[in-house]
Amino acid sequence: MSPAFMTLSPLDQMKETINETPIHIREILRNVVTTSGQTCVSLFYSALFQHERAAIFLEKETVEVKMRPQLLAWIQSLFFTDADHVEELSELQCRIGTIHAQLEIPTDIVVYGLYIIKQALIDGIKASTPDKDDTIAAIIYLSTMMDFAFKFMIKAYDINFRKKVESDEAFRLVSLGHNISYEKETQISTFSGWSTQAFYCLCKDHPEDLPTIAESEFGLWLTHKGMSLFKGTHEANQIQNKVRELDTKIAAIRKTGLIPPEFPTELHKAITSLTFLIGRVFRHLEEVENGRDPLTKVFNRRFLDVVIQNEITFALTHEKPFSLVILDIDHFKKINDQFGHLVGDEVLCFVAEIIAANVRANDFIFRYGGEEFLIVLTEIPLEDGLICAERIRTALAEHPLTLSSSDQVQVTLSGGITTFAGETNARLLIHQADEALYKAKSNGRNCIVATHHTPEKV
């Protein structure tokens, strides 16, 4: 490895790895693949069929007819390719990553599969190479090449998974608020609030306080819900470009402390244009509503994984945190038994209203189970998310539900909260929050427990 190795691109690093590895070491790998390749493939699929989560992605007929020969060809290409053909090799890894994304095969299963192949090839190296130094060198070369392969695979996987989420027409629907009309009035109001604040700063000659749209409540909603809701409309790109252009000018004004003479006129024109575009795109979507719980009017679980995965992608791309809360109504069965299921329905709607009143427009509320609600708090770290969850719990505990019969029902919540810490799928985050919820119930209910990510055991 040269001193400048770490500064090279992954492609050039792979080239140098091949060039710097002695020919006889590379030949060891080629011989092992030639003699043990079929065995590696058999062990790979045997292990995956026994892996509960992996098996659901495999069909035995497809494995026998197509996947076995393709896997063997992939192993051979990885160790038979020379440095002059690294570009073709990297493209192959990218295609494999793309296929995994299209089939929605989780990355942890891909890693598990590569581990099986690596271990089988290591066994082959040990069995065929008596020289200890050659054995070590061959194993290092094997591990390095497979690491490069995985790097190219995962990059393509990530890009194509994002495309899949973004192109999913159903995801556009989950970005709705309580309903289109309500969302329209709310967001026009928040945009108007930002406009008023901007003009106030201009009038007072306070350029340093001039807010960007991205920082405003409307901007947060636009980033996390609005652009997904508007996707596919002609107005979406116009809105995005105008917001970006205006925020760039505002950032420059805040930096220099100088307001150009023409800026107030430009701001007025931009606000007028954006108000028109936002109103028009909402009119196009006025009747579109789906993916909702018919009782509480919050989202049902249909698009939960899509929303969480989209927030994971945003968090990784922009280095922004987000938190996930699961709330459970305490002793809900007793409420049903004492007052009847109609009152139980009233309680569910009441809880949904309390939650909605205490979160922001850019957050997502789901009815997760019979008496459970799940909230995705965007761009919020654990500490602030805990404050929000406590605010919901306190608001409910302090305001009993008054029934039509004038009876009052005291309702409390138990909750668990976790925050994103590098997980790559929704299931791990939900499991974290669910464990915290279980602790809250064990602690006597009517409380919120926070937990942090712990690595999943394979």
Image (cartoon, rainbow, N blue to C red):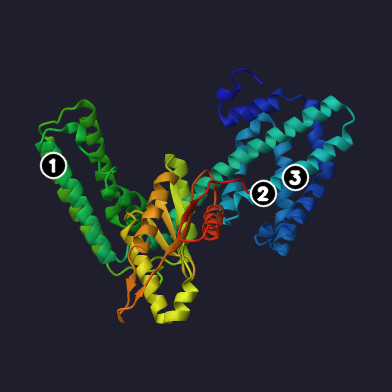
Distance from disc 2 to disc 3, alpha carbons, whole Å, reads: 20 Å
Q: Is residue 140 above or below residue 384?
A: above
Q: Residues within 10 Å of mark 3 (few under 14, many from 20)?
A: many
The answer to whether residue 413 is visible is yes
Q: Residue furthest right?
A: 130
Q: Is residue 169 above or below residue 150?
A: below
Asked if labels 3 and 2 touch by Cβ distance under 8 angstroms, the answer is: no
User: Residue 457, percent across and down?
Assistant: 67, 49
Q: Which residue is mark 2?
A: 457
In depth, the one of 391 and 385 nearer the eye is 391
- Residue under the point 53% across and 57% down: 443
Number of numbered labels in the structure image: 3
Closer to us: 6 or 222: 222
Instruction: Give whichever of 397, 100 is nearer the camera.
Output: 397
Label 1 sits on what residue type? Phe
Percent position of residue 273, x then y: 17, 50
Which of 213 and 121 lies nearest the eye of the viewer? 213
Quadrant of residue 2 within the rendered picture: top right
N-term-proximal mark, 2 vs 1: 1
- Residue 295: quadrant of the picture: bottom left
Tag 2, which secondary structure? loop
Q: Earlier in the sequence, mark 2 or mark 3?
A: 3
For marks 1 and 3 on the same chain, the one whose residue lies earlier in the sequence: 3
Residue 382 placement, left or right of 149: left
Marks 1 and 3: which is nearer the front?
1
As measured in the structure, the alpha-carbon distance from the residue carrying label 2 to the one carrying label 1 is: 55 Å
Label disc, if present, on residue 117 of the rendered structure: 3
